Amino acid sequence: MNKFNLLFCSKSFIFAIKMKKIVFLSTILISSLLFSSCKKGFNFQKESLIQLSEELQNKFTEDAWYTSIIIRGQNGTHNTVVVDVTKDPNSLKQEQWAYDGGFWEKKSNISLEVEGEPTNYMFQIDNEISLEFAYNLIDKTLDDLKNEEEILDPLDVRTLSIRSSSEMNSKEEGVLYTITIFNENTAKSYSYVYYLNGELKNKNL
């Protein structure tokens, strides 16, 4: 084999190795992206709830009106989000959407029957309600269970619900934050309900 053939073969061999490396790295990258998308979701930590707030405003616009935002989860994994939302309150029509595994899916259409202005029964993110404020209520609930109720068992947040009550005289008393905590040792749940301003309405222990 002459020098030209030897040089050509060597370059071809190096090129083949580089191509294999590129294919291998691309496979790893694609697998990582698929894995991360499957794992994508929101939990009850402050940063995650702020991200969810941004996600909702990006998905449904900052001007969207809601009657329900519910986050359900277990041990901070595979949490789902379900919202009842409309971009046009006067239409008396809402859509229910669910977020699970990184994807939104429309679940149903909702018809409303209300007296007076529809927006009197609805709320907007970062206007009447705040998911960052909801995190403060979660922290407040866990603190109450530990220090006031003296429950020192491992506790897990299971549900955060922000909903308009079916019987509403005012938003201050009609839009409620509900937080459900699960006691992993006793398999018992605790439910705390707060008014819009964060004042405790009741707790079920």
Image (cartoon, grey):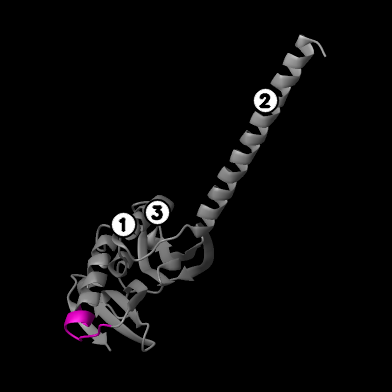
Q: Residue at x 23, y 84 (%)?
A: 202
Q: Relative to 125, say whether 9 is above or below.
A: above
Closer to the camera, 173 or 32?
Answer: 32
Query: Which type of secondary structure does the marked residue at label 2 adopt?
Result: helix
Residue to which mark 2 is pinned: 14
The location of residue 63, given as percent across then percent down, is 34, 53
Which is more N-terminal, label 3 or label 1?
A: 1
Closer to the camera, 100 or 97?
Answer: 100
Whether residue 165 can be seen here = no
**Amino acid tagged 3:** Glu
Spatial CA span between label 1 and label 3: 12 Å
Magenta segment: 144-152
> Could you classify mark 3 by the number of other residues whose Cα lies within 10 Å: few (under 14), some (14-19), or many (20 or more)?
few
Which is more N-terminal, label 2 or label 3?
A: 2
Q: From the viewer's perspective, is the residue at label 3 or at label 2 nearer?
A: 2
Residue to which mark 1 is pinned: 47
Query: Which type of secondary structure does the marked residue at label 1 adopt?
Result: helix
